[in-house]
Image (cartoon, rainbow, N blue to C red):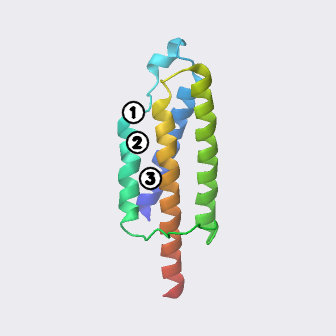
Amino acid sequence: EKGLYSLIESIQQDLIRVGGQVATPERDPLYVRLETMADKDVETLEQHEKKYMKEIEVPKRFILPGATEAGGFLDLSRAVCRRAERSLVSCIREKHSTKLDECRCYLNRLSDLLFVVARWIEKCLRSESSA
């Protein structure tokens, strides 16, 4: 789906912004020039998640990753995203900083979106193989 490619590209650009915000100390003169993460970025992810949720039924049991290759890559991406979120939480606690809260929220919502998109792709690929 063309929309999925656009979404992935947008997420990649957002992750570059997250990285810049995390890597740049607040006292650095460049920090004020950064395009920092905001509520709207998190809301955008939530809107995409809702869109894909309408098209799938999330199983009520634990899901083994990798039912399809594409789904497996998304599940792996989700695991990396969760790890990054945990590292960021440690950083926030260590520095007693609230400036990175939106980055944390973004990573949290992103991991949920990756889960949903993985299930959506698996559904689409199952439909194609049974057609």
Q: Amino acid at mark 1?
A: Ala
Q: Residues within 10 Å of mark 3 (few under 14, many from 20)?
A: some
| x then y, percent, for residue 27 | 53, 11
> How far across and how far down the image is residue 80, in percent?
64, 48
Residue named by callout 2 = 42
Checking the image for residue 7, the label placed there is: 3
**Residue at the bottom extreme?**
131
Does residue 40 appear left or right of residue 34 in this picture? Answer: left
Q: Amino acid at mark 2?
A: Val
Residue depicted at 47% across the width and 39% down the height: 105
How packed mark 2 is, by other alpha carbons closer than 10 Å (few <14, some 14-19, many 20 or more), is some
Q: Mark 2–mark 1 contact, CB under 8 Å?
A: yes
User: Is residue 13 visible in the rendered structure shown here?
Assistant: no
Judge from the rendering whether residue 130 lies leftward or rightward of residue 51; answer left or right.
right
> Callout 3, which amino acid?
Leu
> Are the two marked residues, 1 and 3, in contact with CB atoms closer than 8 angstroms?
no
Neighbor class of circle 1 (other Cα within 10 Å; few <14, some 14-19, many 20+) is: few
**Position of 111 relative to 115 (above/below):** above
